[in-house]
Amino acid sequence: MDENKIQQRRRDQEEAAAEKRAEILGLNYIDARSFEDTFPLARDVFTIEQMYAGFLAPLEVGDEDSYKPWRVLITSQTPRSVVQKLRKKYAESGKALEIYLISDVAWKKIMHRYDPPKQIIYDDIEIAGEGDSETLKQVSQTLATVASDQVFDYLIDQADRLGASDIHIENQRQVIRIRMRVDGALHPVAELGRDRYRVIMGELSSRAGVSSAAKSSQSGHIQKDIYRDGSSHLLNLRVETVPTMYGMDAVLRLFNFDESMLQLDLLGIAPKERAEIDEIISHPRGMVLMVGPTGSGKSTTLYSMLNALNTLDKKIITLEDPIEYGIGGISQIPIDTTAGQSFADGLRSVLRLDPDVVMVGEIRDNDTARTAIQASITGHLVLSSFHANSTSAAFSRMIDMIGMNPIFSSAIRLLIAQRLVRKLDENKKEYRPDEATKAWVRRVLDGVPKDKLPQDITGDFKLWRPVVTADSPFGYKGRMVVMEMMVVNDNIAAFLRGERGAISTEAIEKQARQDGLLTLVQQGVIAALRGDTTLEEVNRVI
């Protein structure tokens, strides 16, 4: 799906939500897309401060002689008291007033016209390639010239523009290194002096509530509204700091609070796997486990499942440490494990609230596992994550944690292990691999049915490599999901019932492969044979 379609879909969802909200509140709704960029601005009706404080904006100035009403725009965030005062003020002065509810994004666009940004436009950050000292120097110079009160926001805005998932601020002996993780790979961005570093850390300390002079690691978070290209989204930043030999290092992890992007359709899941996911999460009970390392996209997939289940007839509750994405219509509860809270205690509490679907951020201990299992067999669909390298390893680890448990065998329905690999852009170049590579591919795919392979690998076959261009400095663009799915059938459940003798990750995987499971590395190699990625990228990530 191209960017324009994504933006259109996102806006459609915003407007649909606003229209529903207006109906609930008994207000007139108006879709502002037809006029938000062109209508004549009604100046001197409200001050800019009043507009920001009340989440409102004037649309049209009235005229008592012609009985033309005054038209005012509000949002779902406008306090009821503000609306009441408006109605009273205009009624007492004999003015006709019409109030329309618009979407939050429409209000932001309109406010962008009433109060355009006054900041200086600086050059965009470019990612430096290996050995590209010139780009590194240019970006460093740009960061050195950005106004002190703007440099932190500039860095965040640029990271969001580049699609970075993380910003690393690292103290070296003589300089401060800035790196960004884009499409799963770390890239150098700039080298700063101590003065710029102190400015950035000062802003970070103020906004995230962490101390740059602390003697131990700290955690914090920041929320920032990003406005770009006619749309806006809320960015959540998870901040982690740690003291090092030369100063305080920081990592800022970026989460886009844009629920329109949390769609299973946008994850690039193969049709067969997608059908299996849809079928399993449509059941009112059972457990689904996501496994994989940090940064493998587990949270995005879980949230996308929740979004698919988020209908008016379902009560959905999540327990998270921390909350990474905000989704309307879902009750999200933060669990602060550093303060002694536990997922198990939280889960027992929320089960008393009669949920249909529960998402537990992570199963970390026996107590949480047993409570989640109990919930999944008593009329709840339970989604959670678990630390393991593969579905078979997760299954084996769960058995080690809770023992051979016939109840668990009827609870667990699906395990998904996934990784994110970089996608080749359209300028990719095909090539014929050497004999050693061919032999390795055939060995990895041994036993995989031919109808699941995009090419015949018995003879000569082709692969692709990245091509560097000005628009794609690394030959990759975006990332895609590589997914290993284990549907728990009776053969797999037998391990939990103690019917299979010796239990090991290898034994479970052997049975699962006989039942049709494709491992992560097999799925990755198949993606490379399709031309979606490279073998080098598969071996780097999986």
Image: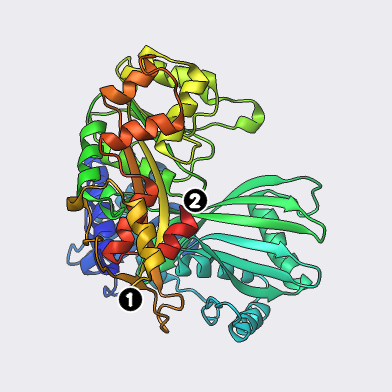
The foreground one among 402 and 250 is: 402
- Give the quarter of the image for residue 379: top left
Secondary structure beneath dot 1 equals strand
Q: Nearer the viewer, mark 2 or mark 1?
A: 1
Above or below — where is 263 with respect to 151? above
- In percent of width and height, residue 282 lies at 22, 31
Residue that numbered label 1 is attached to = 431
Task: Report the amino acid beneath label 2.
Answer: Gly
Secondary structure beneath dot 2 equals loop
Q: Please report whichever mark, 2 or 1, sits nearer to the chain's N-terminal start.
A: 2
Question: Which residue sits at x=40%, y=70%?
Answer: 476
- Give the quarter of the image for residue 417: top left
- In percent of width and height, residue 484 lies at 35, 43
Above or below — where is 131 with respect to 501? below
The foreground one among 316 and 464 is: 464
Question: Which residue sits at x=50%, y=61%?
Answer: 49
Task: Report the amino acid beneath label 1.
Answer: Tyr
Label number found at residue 226: none
Label number found at residue 295: 2
The Cα–Cα distance between marks 2 and 1, rounded to whole angstroms, is 30 Å
The reply to whether residue 19 is visible in this rendering is yes
Question: Which residue sits at x=43%, y=66%?
Answer: 227
Q: How is the image coloured?
A: rainbow
Above or below — where is 474 with respect to 514? below
Question: Which residue sits at x=55%, y=78%?
Answer: 129
